[in-house]
Image: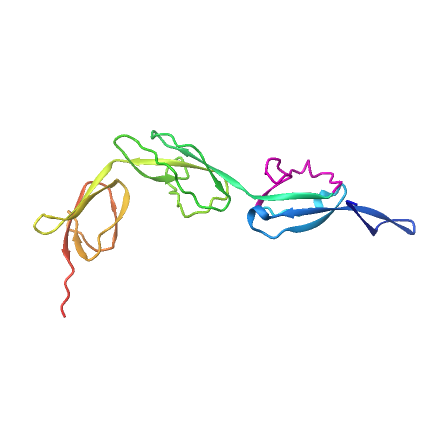
Amino acid sequence: SNAHYVMLSYKSGNTYSPVNFYTVKLDYSAVSGTDQVQYVETGRNSTLSLDDNYQWYLDQAHTTPATAENLKNIRSTTTLYAAHKTRTVTFVTNGGSNLDPLVVSHGETLTLTESSEKEGYLLEGWYTDEALTKRFDFATPITENLTLYAKWALPCTVSFLDAAGSPIQESIIIAAGSELSLPQYYHWTGEDGHTFQGGETVTITADTVFTGSIYTYTV
């Protein structure tokens, strides 16, 4: 029988009446978890404890979500199926080419599958606010629906020359406002005379030339 008759639940006078409890199996196979079993009193689905880290379904194909309404009156042995929650990331490209929304599993990080482009500009980064003040960190787990806003900047050419004016390496084109780690093993001097060590991070705001001298060591 689907019902489990449990004595000592409701007292009427000097007698106890049986109360129907039904088995609810929590199937974690789709999320590599361990299955669980709970017992729910008829009409008291509030005693059912579901892990909020997952979305729950009435079917293994994950087409019918389990809701408070369809769990309200469990009257038979029931299996609920866990699935990873999903979050939707929407992109506002601010004049760039459109990007389709991406669906990400709850708690996973975001990987872009395509890039937005805007003629004459480079993408400086993605931001979580319309004012473009809060830069999005792609190492951040996605735990809620999210809208990202593109920030565009003019391209800047960064050149690396030696004292004779010959290139030390190929020039780099990056978006204005971006950070750049200077090549290792050189002392660098900017056009304003400011000096930097190799590996130091600088912010590029315009076309820039760095003049380098290689590290020397006395043995």
Quadrant in the rendering for residue 213: bottom left
In the image, residue 217 lies at what x, y percent? 15, 65
The one of 59 and 103 positioned closer to us in this rendering: 59
The residue range painted magenta reads 53-76
Seen in the image, is 194 located left or right of residue 18? left
In the rendered image, the quadrant that contains the N terminus is: top right
Total residue callouts:
0
Q: Residue at x 59, y 35 (%)?
A: 63
For residue 69, what is the image quadrant? top right
Q: Nearer the viewer, residue 180 or 3?
A: 3
Name the residue at 41% across, 34% down: 91
Q: Closer to the camera, 52 or 55? A: 55
* 85 versus 197 height, above or below: above
Whether residue 124 can be seen here: yes
Q: Where is the C terminus found, in terms of image quarters? A: bottom left
Q: Residue at x 27, y 33 (%)?
A: 121
| The one of 146 and 27 positioned closer to us in this rendering | 27
Q: Position of residue 144 (x, y in %)?
A: 50, 41
Q: Decide whether residue 102 is among the magenta residues.
A: no
Image spot of residue 53 (x, y percent): 57, 47
Q: Which secondary structure type mostly characterizes the magenta part of the structure?
A: loop
User: In the image, is 211 to the left or to the right of 94?
Assistant: left
The residue positioned farthest toward the bottom in the image shown: 219
Side of 105 where 39 appears, left or right: right
Q: Horizontally, is 144 left or right of 124 in the view?
A: right
- The percent coordinates of residue 30 (x first, y second) are 57, 46
Q: Is residue 56 magenta?
A: yes
